[in-house]
Each structure stands twice: as structure tokens, then as C-alpha cells.
Image (cartoon, rainbow, N blue to C red):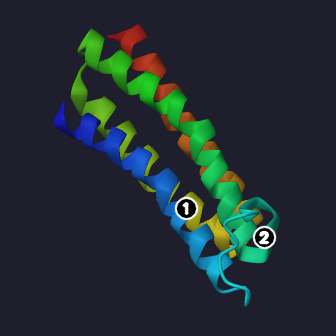
Amino acid sequence: MTILIICLLVSISQIYLAKAVVAVAMSREGKGYDNHHPRLQQSKWGGRAYGAHQNGFEAFPIFAIAILLNLIIEVDFYFAEILALSFVSLRFIYIYLYIADFSFARSTTWTLAFICNIGLYILPLVY
């Protein structure tokens, strides 16, 4: 159970890890960080980091609900933990691939992470 909760916390932090990369990119654009119009300032790898940041907000609720569902139903945590750890690991890879602009690998990684999420929803059904 502890691993599932840690994965949930790591998944939250991944959203803001990507945002930290956005802030670094914005500060390196020559004019410094424009706090008046930050969304207009993003370009190149900073824009991709912003996309990874936004995607984190899209992926997190689905993952969080799956984790909470597994905790409430108390499924066999062994498989739930493998899926959760896989999801979190794939999301780290996804963020890197998004920022580095490896589009095909990024989409493949996203799909694998999504399959992990689906697996977390299937576990309570077969338990």
C-alpha cells in the first residue's frame, strides 16, 4: 500500500517537474522570465516542456482514481504496485522524450503508461 501512495505523490511531483523545466527555458530566452505573459513566452523546448506539464494534469486524475480504487477495494497490491511503478517510470521517460522532441517514442511511451492505467482499473474487476 505504501508504494501505491508514494507513486501517487511522485505522479503529482512529475507535473511540477515539467513546469520547472518550463521556467528554466523561459529564463534562458534572453529577456528573462516574463511573469506578466508567461504563456506567450514559451517556445522550442520550453514549449514542449509546457506541453508535458499540461499532459501531466490530464494523466494524473485517471491515475489517482485508479490508485484510490485499488486501495479502497484492497486488491492484491503486488500487481497494482507493478503497474503503478511502471506508470510513474514511463511518465518520467515521457517527460524527457517530450522535451527532447522524440515524438514517436513519446507517443509510444504515453500509450504504455495508459495501458498501465487501464490495468489498474481492471485489477479490481478480476480480484
Crowdedness near tag 1: few (<14), some (14–19) or many (≥20) residues, C-alpha within 10 Å = many
Does label 1 or label 2 sit earlier along the sequence? 1
Would you say the residues marked 1 and 2 are in contact, meaning their CB atoms lie under 8 Å apart? no
> Which residue is drawn at the image coordinates 26% and 35% (left, top)?
5
Q: Which mark is residue 105?
A: none
Given the image, on which type of amino acid does mark 1 rest?
Answer: Ala
Task: Point out the image quarter for the N terminus.
Answer: top left
> Depth-wise, is mark 1 or mark 2 nearer the camera?
2
Q: Is residue 25 above or below residue 88?
A: below
Front residue of 107/96: it is: 96
The answer to whether residue 53 is left or right of residue 9 is: right
The picture places residue 112, in percent across and down from the top left corner, at 57, 45
Q: Is residue 113 above or below residue 122?
A: below
What is the residue that sits farthest to the bottom in this orientation?
30
Crowdedness near tag 2: few (<14), some (14–19) or many (≥20) residues, C-alpha within 10 Å = some
Task: Read off the residue under disc 1.
Answer: 18
Task: Read off the residue under disc 2.
Answer: 41
